[in-house]
Amino acid sequence: MKIYHGTNVEFGVIDLKICPPNRDFGQGFYCTNIKKHAIERAEDKVDEEGGNVNILEYEFDFDEIAKINPKLKIKRFENVCIEWAQFVMFNRLRKKGEQLHEYDIVEGPVADDKMFRQFRLLADNRIKLNDFVHRIEFREATHQIAFCTEESLDALLDYNEPSRYKIEEIIAELSVKLMQDRDISKIDAMTIVYNSEISNQLADENTGLYLMPWQEIYELLHLELNNSK
């Protein structure tokens, strides 16, 4: 699926440290699969802070992200429910210094500011949890997905830059093979690979070298190293 991030600024690096801490799913980089909502978010930011509407678009698939990093902890809320309400309330009311939840990626409905009065009533024990869920469950359909750790952001970017991810895999394979063949340390092997012309060609996507099997690329590396003696 396609997911979108609406903002009023342009940036090259996603910095989790500057993300607001007390959002529905905690501090994180938030996207949605509803483009209209991303645009509205960006327009609101422009009205509040100036700048220009900027919509970032990413491809995302849970199964593929799990292949990139199987260690990622993912939590998905299909709809408004008691567990979702408790989770959102914890994050919204979490005090500075309290530990963030354990998940790398969290997906679920949005608890917008119109709902926050209901959260306050719930936090003050003025309404019961079942009543809270009933009051907000019939709102307009929403969606958000929060990337809460550097590992989750790396996986998202790797999925959207498959050539970079593939090149890193190839470099790793070449280094291990060279380490075995020459009986050298991993650091020495990686240094040799990264300083090779083959590494430069891999980094240049126009060569298409990264599309070849790593075993064939290793033969080219082996030839280059022999010729350089």
Image (cartoon, rainbow, N blue to C red):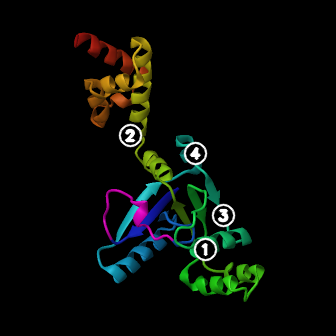
Q: Nearer the viewer, mark 2 or mark 1?
A: 2
Per the model, the C-alpha gap separating discs 4 and 3 is: 17 Å
Task: Tell me, for residue 66, which label it has, or none.
Answer: 4
According to the image, label 1 marks what residue?
141
How far from the left and from the top, in percent, is residue 141?
Answer: 60, 74
Q: Is residue 129 magenta?
A: no
Which element type, helix, strand or loop, lies under badge 4? helix
Task: Tell me, for residue 77, which label it has, or none.
Answer: 3
Quarter of the view holding residue 199: top left
In this picture, residue 225 sits left or right of residue 165: left
> Which residues are the magenta region?
9-21
Query: Which is more N-terminal, label 1 or label 2?
Result: 1
Q: Are marks 3 and 1 in contact (CB under 8 Å)?
A: no
Query: How packed is label 2: few (under 14 Cα within 10 Å), some, or many (20 or more)?
Result: some
Task: Tell me, for residue 164, which label it has, or none.
Answer: 2
Residue at point 47% right, 68% down? 35
